[in-house]
Image: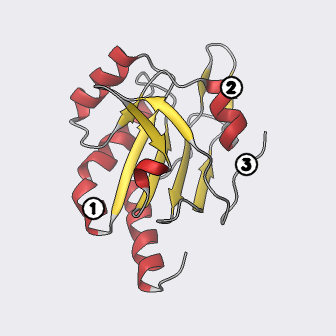
Amino acid sequence: MPILHNGDSFPELKIPAVGSGSLVIPRDLAGSYGVVLIYRGSWCPYCNAQLAAFGRAQDRLEQLNTKVVAFSVDDEDKAEELVRKHKLGFPVGHSADADEIAAAVGSYTNTEPKYLNSTGFVLDPDGKVITAVYSSGAIGRLTADDVIGFLRYVQSNNRH
């Protein structure tokens, strides 16, 4: 299970999206900075807090030319309920294949029940990783405020 390092190109992932269509990452983020949030599931209180915080920070992220996407192994109904509950304005995917995602990006997985542990990536406008956070359990994840501060730093120094 290889992990992604800074400078690596983010692999193409296609995940069904709440509502309709699919998330195609990193293509859907091209030309903007991107935040990819892999969350454990709608049942996880830490994931709920993280996604709600990114939802509240969406205007500040958009001012930094940043798009957010999130996904999990949740089925569409659970993911849709989560989007409604937190009024998320960014695309959320569902029904991700845990083994396929883990093989592509190196996320840790839980065996029983099967789900992906929290994993987060910040991508540059070319789809290259500029920071990655891997969690092997319930805690340890990207926060909206940290991402905003990091992107302000990156953009003010005009570097990835």
- Could you say where residue 127 lies in the image, as x and y percent from the top left? 54, 59
Along the line of sight, the residue nearer the viewer: 153 or 4: 4
Using residue 102 as the reference point, say whether residue 64 is left or right of it.
left
Tell me the amino acid under the disc marked 1.
Glu
In the rendered structure, which disc, 1 or 3, sits on the residue that comes first in sequence? Answer: 3
Tell me the amino acid under the disc marked 2.
Asp
Residue 38 seen by the camera: yes
In the rendered structure, which disc, 1 or 2, sits on the residue that comes first in sequence? Answer: 1
- Could you say where residue 8 lies in the image, as x and y percent from the top left? 67, 60
| Residue for point 54% across, 48% down | 120
In the rendered structure, which disc, 2 or 3, sits on the residue that comes first in sequence? Answer: 3
| Residue for point 66% across, 43% down | 105
Whether pointer 1 and pointer 3 mark residues with C-beta atoms closer than 8 Å, the reply is no
The secondary element bearing badge 2 is classed as: helix
Outermost residue to the right = 1
User: How does the figure colour the protein chain or chains?
Assistant: secondary structure
Reading the image, the residue beneath label 1 is 62
Marks 1/3: CA–CA distance: 28 Å
User: Crowding at label 3, few (<14), some or many (≥20) Cα neighbours within 10 Å?
Assistant: some
Image quarter of the N terminus: top right
Reading the image, the residue beneath label 2 is 99
Whether pointer 1 and pointer 2 mark residues with C-beta atoms closer than 8 Å, the reply is no
Marks 1/2: CA–CA distance: 32 Å
Q: Is residue 75 above or below residue 63?
A: above
Outermost residue to the bottom = 157
The secondary element bearing badge 1 is classed as: helix
Q: Is residue 149 above or below residue 85?
A: below
Reading the image, the residue beneath label 3 is 3
- Could you say where residue 114 lies in the image, as x and y percent from the top left? 62, 17
